[in-house]
Image (spheres, helix red, strand yellow):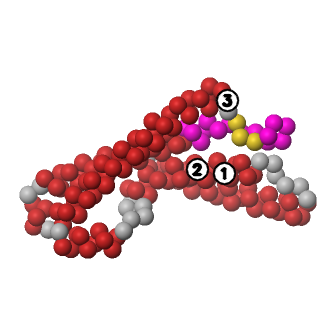
Amino acid sequence: MTVGLNVLGTLLIVAVMVLVNADVIGRGMFDNPISGVPEIVSMSIVAIVFLQIAQTFRKGKLTRTDAVLGFVQRRAPRLRIGLDFLFSLAAIALVWQIFTASAPLFKKSWIRNTYEGTVGDFTAPIWPVKLIILIGCAALLVQLVMFATEAGLRLISKSEAAE
């Protein structure tokens, strides 16, 4: 599932690049820009982040202090596992807060059909981006729970001390 979300995020990046280039060409060569490009780009950036964050975490590519974690790993492997476990619990709490704060915003934008843009020029509903935030948070929560479970099992395992 995370790979599929990541692919959608990548396709959205390509679409935004094509749109921005078409807008620049239209603006420069024909003095006719594409309406709504700034709104589409701003909404797309948020969507891209939430579409790709679960896979980024799954692959271990989120920004972190590898130098410190590597140092701890060499000196005290069980402490490193404990840090991973604590990190995942804190991350679960944080992402859950984002999810629970975003759910009412999605519901409100869906019910009210809230839009971005200017009436008569360009409008786009914002509920799809709000839904993507919820989906991205849910996918990340699954990955974090799996990571926490693995770290917790490694932490209580006797064989980990041999590594």
Q: Is the residue 144 above or below the residue 113 in the image?
A: below
Which mark sits nearer the N-terminus, 2 or 3? 2
* The label number, if any, that marks residue 153 in the structure image: none
Report crowding for label 2: few under 14, some 14 to 19, many 20 or more residues within 10 A (C-alpha): some
Q: Is residue 129 magenta?
A: yes
Q: Name the amino acid type tagged 1.
A: Ser
Q: Is the residue 90 above or below the residue 25 in the image?
A: above
Q: What element carries label 2?
A: helix
User: Is residue 152 shown to the viewer in this render?
Assistant: yes
* The label number, if any, that marks residue 113 in the structure image: 3
Q: Disc 1 marks which residue?
A: 42
Which mark sits nearer the N-terminus, 1 or 3? 1
Image coordinates for residue 140, horizontal then vertical, percent: 41, 47
Image coordinates for residue 15, horizontal then vertical, percent: 67, 54
In whole angstroms, how far apart are the C-alphas of marks 2 and 3?
A: 19 Å
Circles 1, 3 touching at the beta carbon (< 8 Å):
no
**What's the magenta region?**
118-131
User: Is residue 143 shown to the viewer in this render?
Assistant: no
In whole angstroms, how far apart are the C-alphas of marks 1 and 3?
A: 18 Å
Residue 129 or 76: which is nearer the viewer?
Answer: 76
Q: Name the amino acid type tagged 3.
A: Asn
Image coordinates for residue 40, horizontal then vertical, percent: 70, 49
Which residue is rendered at x = 83% and y = 63% of the image? 25
